[in-house]
Image (spheres, grey):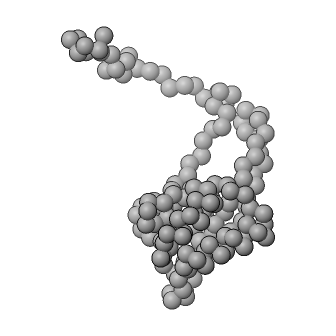
Amino acid sequence: MILSEIKNHLQTLDTIAFELPNGDLVPAHFHVTEVGKISKHFIDCGGTVRTENVINFQLWNANDYNHRLHPEKLTHIIELSEKTLGLEDLEIEVEYQGDTIGKYALDFNGTNFLLVNKATACLAEDACGIPKPKVRLSDLQQQACAPNSGCC
């Protein structure tokens, strides 16, 4: 989800809820303690120099159980961040404290914002030296047309 999309979704909501990948909700008394831009400048294992820019939201829970962040307040925080930091309409990454700080992509199901697990990957698979998986003959035979099926 990009920044403009979360702002559009916030306009339709009365309350904000973030749902973890296991279906649990982030406690309703969460705070958004940071909104910022993270820039990553790196070289992949194939020698290609890359940059990655994301908007970062950090969610945090405190012991103030009466705290509730309303959609218009989060919209205000986002707009202030855009103005002050010159944020672009980039993908959003959410940090949330579990056993360690987790980084999640963001989606929306019409009611809740979904924290979506992210995974690492090789960006230079062709230069990395990892062999392609071998296709088994039995897999090819299962994909072939069955006699008298009309597909051949």
- Image coordinates of residue 49 in percent, x first then y, are 78, 39
| Residue 63 relative to residue 122: left or right | left
Classify the position of the C terminus by image quarter: top left
Q: At 59% across and 65% down in the image, what residue appears?
A: 7
Give the image quarter of residue 132: top right
Question: Residue at position x 54%, y 79% from top?
Answer: 70
Along the line of sight, which residue is nearer the eye, 132 or 149?
A: 149
What percent of the width, then of the height, locates residue 52?
72, 49
Q: Can the viewer see residue 48 in this picture?
A: yes
| Residue 140, percent from left and from top | 37, 18
120 left or right of 39 in image: left
Q: Residue furthest left?
A: 148
Hey, which quadrant is residue 31 in on the image? Answer: bottom right
Lateral position of residue 99 relative to residue 33, left or right: left
Q: Residue at x 40, y 64 (%)?
A: 23
Q: Nearer the viewer, residue 95 or 68?
A: 68
